[in-house]
């Protein structure tokens, strides 16, 4: 529910053909972590029984869950509880033969991949950044061993490299400074293959060709463009993303507490006063 306009959006689950994220959250009751876990376990069992009845089943090696709860110290500072270390939070999934199998209980700072996008409950972008580096390094290694011409390298950078490496970048919340240097090593390695000397200034590697640069995709700029596109496409719409953006902005207004136009205030000055969000 939006804290300002009381706009309500209901979410039961996010369901895809080959991936399913079951989200359990009840804002109407103040449940303990253990009660929440029991409700999660019941939901998982019920969903598993439906899968079995329709001819499917869970695949335990591909299943995992996070149990997120908080604790406060004497100074009022909060932190995540280490629920993954507690044996009582062992979740099981039903199997077609009537048995059950335990699934991994991951720490809240462990990133996992869902539909090609890496994320973790704490909101860190480390997992997504490492995934970009891994994909980029794999492409660079293949290109270095190939017999591609120089023109082929630059052509494939646009039509093959970046679509693969930059997939899902609109969901990446890494700071610009981190994204700016994310692929420096990979760009340095591929430049000789494209006919550029290794001693060329690093600053021109991600400079657009229209400005006489090498034209390697700049993750920071590409992420910013994707974020703006997402905002313009969904904000004000009745879609799921539109509702999330709407609520996120209203929560930002409440947390900042300065005006109804939070984007008019200095980010550098007030960034520690609010939780980082989609906006």
Image (tube, helix red, strand yellow):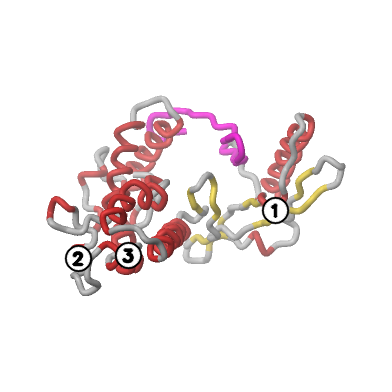
Q: Which residue is mark 3?
A: 190
Most foreground residue, 111 or 71: 111
- What's the distance in space between the residues labelled 3 and 2, CA to CA? 15 Å
Say left or right for 138 vs 15.
left
Q: Which residue is mark 1?
A: 61
Q: Determine whether the residue tagged by mark 2 lies in a helix, strand or loop.
A: helix
Provide the secondary structure element on which disc 3 rests. Answer: helix
Q: How many marks?
A: 3
User: With respect to residue 32, does 189 lie above or below?
Assistant: below
- Residue plotted at (76% across, 40% down): 45
* Residue 277 is covered by the magenta coloring: no
Dominant SS type (magenta):
loop
Name the one closer to the observer, 19 or 271.
19
10 to 19, vertically: above or below: above
Q: Give the residues drawn in magenta, as a range.
A: 1-27
Q: Earlier in the sequence, mark 3 or mark 2?
A: 3
Residue topped by disc 2:
203
């Amino acid at each position: 529910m939006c804290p300002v306009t009381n706009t309500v959006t209901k979410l039961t689950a996010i369901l895809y053909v080959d991936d399913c994220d079951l989200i359990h959250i009840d804002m109407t009751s103040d449940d303990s972590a253990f009660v929440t876990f029991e409700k999660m376990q019941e939901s998982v069992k019920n969903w598993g029984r439906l899968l079995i009845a329709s001819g499917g089943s869970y695949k335990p090696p591909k299943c995992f869950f996070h149990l997120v709860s908080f604790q406060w110290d004497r100074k009022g500072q909060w932190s995540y509880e280490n629920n993954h270390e507690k044996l009582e939070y062992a979740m099981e999934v039903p199997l077609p033969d009537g048995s059950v199998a335990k699934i991994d209980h991951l720490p809240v700072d462990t990133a996992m991949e869902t539909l090609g996008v890496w994320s973790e409950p704490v909101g860190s972008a480390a997992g997504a950044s490492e995934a970009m580096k891994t994909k980029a390094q794999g492409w660079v290694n293949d290109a270095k061993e190939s017999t591609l011409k120089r023109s082929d390298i630059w052509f494939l950078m646009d039509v093959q490299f970046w679509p693969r490496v930059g997939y899902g970048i609109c969901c990446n919340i890494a700071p610009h400074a981190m994204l700016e240097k994310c692929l420096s090593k990979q760009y340095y390695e591929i430049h000789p293959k494209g006919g550029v000397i290794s001693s060329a200034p690093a600053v021109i590697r991600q400079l657009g060709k229209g400005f006489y640069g090498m034209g390697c995709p700049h993750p920071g700029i590409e992420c910013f463009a994707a974020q703006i596109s997402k905002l313009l496409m969904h904000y004000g719409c009745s879609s799921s993303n539109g509702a999330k953006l709407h609520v996120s902005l209203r929560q930002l207004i409440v947390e900042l507490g300065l005006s109804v136009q939070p984007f008019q205030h200095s980010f550098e000055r007030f960034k520690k006063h609010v939780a980082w969000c989609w906006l």
